[in-house]
Image (tube, rainbow, N blue to C red):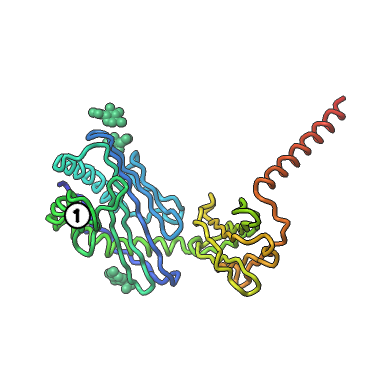
Amino acid sequence: MGRVLFLLLWVLPQVWGSSEVLGRSFLFRCLQITSFANSSWWRTDGLAWLGELQTHRWSNASDKIDSVKPWAQGTFSSQLQSVFRGYRSSFTRDVQEFAKMLSLEYPIELQLSAGCEVHPGNISENFVYAAYEGKYILSFQGSAWEPAPHAPHLVESVVKVLNQDRGTSEILQGLLRDTCPQLVNGILEKGKSELEKQVKPEAWLSRGPSPGPGRLLLVCHVSGFYPQPVWVMWMRGEQEQQGTQRGDFLPNGDETWYLQATLDVAAGEAAGLACRVKHSSLGGQDLVLYWDGSHNSVGLTILLTCLALLFMLILGLTLWMRRHR
Ligand SMILES: *[C@@H]1O[C@H](CO)[C@@H](O)[C@H](O)[C@H]1NC(C)=O
Ligand SMILES: *[C@@H]1O[C@H](CO)[C@@H](O)[C@H](O)[C@H]1NC(C)=O
Ligand SMILES: *[C@@H]1O[C@H](CO)[C@@H](O)[C@H](O)[C@H]1NC(C)=O
């Protein structure tokens, strides 16, 4: 199935970086999305992240993997670039052959996630997962492909065919075991300062939509921090409030994070509560915000802001008209 280009892998230059640069583990993830509208129309696009930062992208229209960060530039050597070009076209051909063999219906949507996690001490783990129509169907484990638990029967025949190709399997093992950690070490060395940056969170409180009569929803917003690990809790004195609900981490546009923590309390019990935030950037100086009852709901805040803006606009217009009369 035309995988000869993979052989180029063996001429890769052996450049080793130091996995000790930052003294912590880093996950490198590549995502591939391939969509077939029919047997003759398809596209494959890719993205790569090191930890929380996107480092590369690969558009179907492009012949090469582009770095998103200046410090990730040149990390995919030209040989590695051509290995991936070869991979992209043989992947397309393989899917078309499988579609014929198994009489699959178009459109077909495939997603792959592959990469490695590099730990201090030059230890690494790696993974390859594939999904079909948004469902996890198979993975590469050690030296062979395996169907996912509860995968449809068809997947077994795909796995059988894939596992007959020992050559490709060995090359994939090399890519995962050697090339991936090598790549990560190279990026870590060049991107050290940005990867170890610390950005302090800001925090503020507001009142959420009322959960019921006589109850209040206290919302603690924490935003603009990096890296992601953060601790946010509603407290009464030194006592953690177990009812604290954490939302999902949401990305801000500037590669920092946003998180909110809410607490549903009886209206009379809100006084004395505080939101406490711990983050590596704060150097042990936790942020503590006290609930003082004056926090308006978001809707009211927006309304008041709009009224204030309208007032200023009218004032401005009046002054302008006076001056021009
Ligand atoms: C394949 O899909 C593309 C995009 O939807 C469409 O423009 C094209 O006409 C289709 N070709 C065939 C042979 O159905
Ligand atoms: C994606 O790239 C391949 C190879 O360059 C090309 O043949 C195909 O037409 C492209 N698909 C789209 C939708 O542009
Ligand atoms: C790191 O591990 C790789 C194999 O995973 C090995 O080839 C390389 O020599 C090791 N580098 C160092 C500095 O120990």
Q: Which residue is mark 1?
A: 7
Q: What's under tag 1, amino acid-wise?
A: Leu
Position of residue 224 in the picture relative to residue 25 (left or right) = right
Between residue 109 and residue 65, name the one nearer to us: 109
Looking at the picture, how far across and down is residue 292, in whole percent?
72, 61
Residues packed near mark 1 inside 10 Å, few (<14), some (14 to 19) or many (20 plus)? some
Looking at the picture, how far across and down is residue 279, in whole percent?
56, 67
Looking at the picture, how far across and down is residue 211, in whole percent?
59, 54
Q: Residue furthest top?
A: 325
Q: Residue furthest front?
A: 213
Position of residue 157 in the picture relative to residue 17 (left or right) = left
How many numbered callouts? Answer: 1
The quarter of the rendering in which ligand 1 is drawn is top left
Q: Is mark 1 within 8 Å of ligand 3?
A: no
Between residue 259 and residue 24, name the one nearer to us: 259
Position of residue 7 in the picture relative to residue 225 (left or right) = left
Q: Residue at x 32, y 48 (%)?
A: 32
